[in-house]
Image (cartoon, helix red, strand yellow):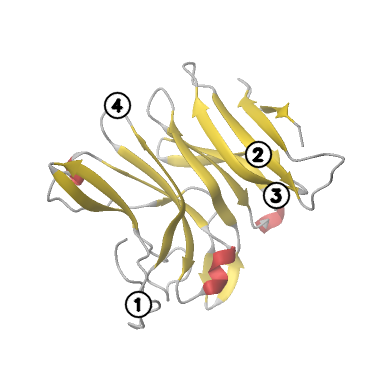
Amino acid sequence: GGQVPQASDGTVCNATAQGDLMLALHDQQWEEHLAIEGDASAKNPFFTDGYIGLNASLAVDRQGNVHTAAQHYYEFCDWNSSLYPNLLYSWHTPAQLAQGVHTTAMEQIVDEPNIYSGGAAQQQASMGNYCKLVLDGQDNPMIFYVGTPSGAQGGESRTSLRMARLEANVWTPEIIEVLEDWSVASLSADVDSQGTPGVAYFMKENPDDSDYPNHLRYAQRASDGTWNSVVVDNSS
């Protein structure tokens, strides 16, 4: 929902599309609130609005705050940016979502952003596929997702299943599993009563190899921060 996207010079990029992620809350009647704006400032300052929410996830903590994660997928005027989506996060208090109140929290980039300068790509990462947001026992958000870093400064550039957690207002991403010739087609995640995160995910080989069929895996984080992954079912 939300606003029709346009470029900074006023050019309407798609007159029939709305590019924002919305929340609808019911209190006597349904009322729409802006969750994450399709703002492209972190990707390309020329395009002031884009498409949010191809992958989105939501969780409500014990104080009623609404935590939202979503993929900023592309600017409507710049289709090439669909190759390099960003993963964004925001949260809203109950007061911000009260009837008749329409305020928007500032979104945060969860993992490595895309940075453009003068039309040239300085940093190209792709983050947020299949994102799933969960809360730990202290209501700190964790987001599970698939991402491909840019490999800037010689860093890791392979696609991986990832988790990022927010602590002291800083997002710290970590790799669960490097995917190599595999892709994740879906995932589900949660945190147990001891605060241990776990994720189940469907692995699909590219291209499909009948000697090692597509299969369901499960990974759990150990106390030392490592992730242990097992095959749940490898039936073809």
Q: Amino acid at mark 3?
A: Glu
Indicate the position of residue 22 as horizontal and vertical percent values: 31, 53
Tell me the residue that label 3 is attached to.
156
Q: Amino acid at mark 1?
A: Ala
Tell me the residue that label 2 is attached to.
202
User: Which of labels 4 and 2 is toward the front?
Assistant: 2
Indicate the position of residue 152 as horizontal and vertical percent values: 66, 58
Alpha carbon separation for disc pair 3 and 1: 39 Å
Q: Amino acid at mark 4?
A: Arg
With 184 as the anchor, is 37 left or right in this view?
Answer: left
Residue at 54%, 62% (x, y): give it.
114
Alpha carbon separation for disc pair 1 and 2: 37 Å
How packed mark 3 is, by other alpha carbons closer than 10 Å (few <14, some 14-19, many 20 or more), is: some
Circles 3 and 1, Cβ within 8 Å, touching? The answer is no
Picture layout, residue 31 above or below residue 133: below
Residue at 63%, 53% (x, y): give it.
149
